Image (cartoon, rainbow, N blue to C red):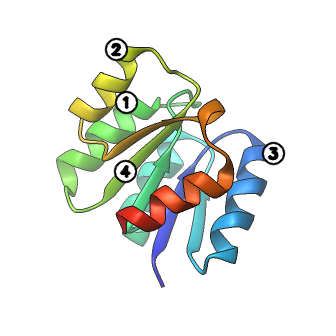
Amino acid sequence: MKKILLVEDDPFLIDIYTTKLREENFKVDVADNGDRALELVEKEKPDLVLLDIVLPNKDGWEILKEIKAKNKEIKVIILSNLGQKEEVEKGLKLGAEKYLIKSNFTPSEVVEEIKNLI
């Protein structure tokens, strides 16, 4: 069973995405802040991190840098409302496999992107 770490601080989105991912037989862990996200990456070694950018403690950019510095095998998909061209380019340059803008993708489409990647 593939492990997904969902890094998101919106309880509504956490509920939607954990439900969708579990329906597709993924094991899902959730971190609602940057420190917890990095703890879970170390402890759980997820196959993929679904990462928001705007978070308490540490933002998604810091988390992405730390994940890629320690373990390049962990795939990261950024799922954010930040959709400026510069932000998308920054995310990909820092090592994210994909940059998805929340308003452009349904939860089902996000799950399909994850399945295609792992």
Give the percent coordinates (x, y) of residue 6: 56, 54
Cα separation between marks 1 and 2: 13 Å
Q: Look at label 2 and name its amino acid.
A: Glu
Q: Nearer the viewer, mark 1 or mark 4?
A: 4
Of the numbered discs 1 and 2, the one sitting upstream in the chain is: 1
In this picture, is 56 found above or below 96? Answer: above
CA separation, marks 3 and 4? 21 Å
Q: Is 41 on the left-hand or right-hand side of 106? A: left
Label 1 or label 4, whichever comes before in sequence order:
1
- Is residue 89 rendered to the left or right of residue 116? left
Left/right of residue 18 with respect to residue 26 in the rendered view: right
Q: Are marks 2 and 4 in contact (CB under 8 Å)?
A: no
Amino acid type assigned to the residue bearing label 3 in the image: Phe
Q: Secondary structure at mark 2?
A: helix
- Cβ atoms at labels 2 and 3 below 8 Å apart: no
Residue at left offset 68%, top offset 56%? 17
- What residue did someone put label 4 on? 76
Separation of marks 1 and 4 at Cα, in angstroms: 11 Å
Q: Between disc 3 and disc 4, whose residue precedes? A: 3
Image spot of residue 98 (x, y percent): 37, 43
* Position of residue 42 measured from the top left corner of the image (x, y, whole percent): 36, 62
Q: Secondary structure at mark 4?
A: strand
Q: Is 71 or 113 nearer to us in this picture?
A: 113
Q: Which residue is mark 2?
A: 86
- Residue carrying label 1: 61
Precedes in sequence: disc 1 or disc 3: 3
